[in-house]
Image (cartoon, grey):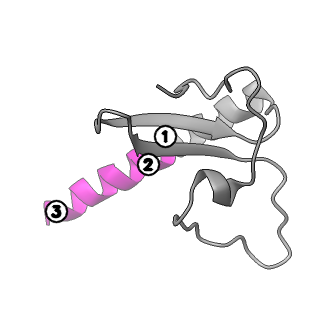
Amino acid sequence: MGSHSGTPEPGRDRVPVADVLPGLELHPLEQNETAIEAFVLIKLLDAEGHASWSYRTTNALNREELLGALVVQVAVLKKELRDEWDDDED
């Protein structure tokens, strides 16, 4: 079983993103934006064919900054879901 904590197994080097997520695509960044770090949440099938979640990061991310970004994303998603719920009531 792979590491679902995002911590690589000893002796496993980092590889290009396309090698980890073959066949998957992301929306591009805006013109003149440059990616410097990434946190990727991945839904996968494990060796037994069960759906599971894992994450991977680029270099060692600042954990406080990552937590802040994730907290903001949760708040945005909650608002979007709440807005959709309110729209359904009309």
Residue 78: image quadrant is top left
**Any magenta on residue 4?**
no
* Foreground residue among 84 and 40: 40
The percent coordinates of residue 15 (x first, y second) are 75, 47
N-terminal-most mark, 3 or 2: 2
Q: CA distance from mark 3 to mark 2?
A: 17 Å
Residue in view at x 22 percent, y 54 percent: 85
Q: In the rendered view, does 62 fall on the left or right side of 18?
A: right
Please provide the residue range marked out in magenta: 76-90
Q: In the rendered view, does 45 fall on the left or right side of 50?
A: right
Q: CA distance from mark 1 to mark 2?
A: 5 Å
Mark 3 = which residue? 88
The percent coordinates of residue 50 (x first, y second) are 28, 35
Q: In the rendered view, does 77 fall on the left or right side of 88?
A: right
**Any magenta on residue 82?**
yes
* Foreground residue among 81 and 5: 5
Badge 3 element: helix
Mark 2 = which residue? 77
Q: Say which mark, if any, is on residue 74.
A: 1
Q: Residues within 10 Å of mark 3 (few under 14, many from 20)?
A: few
Q: Are marks 1 and 2 in contact (CB under 8 Å)?
A: yes
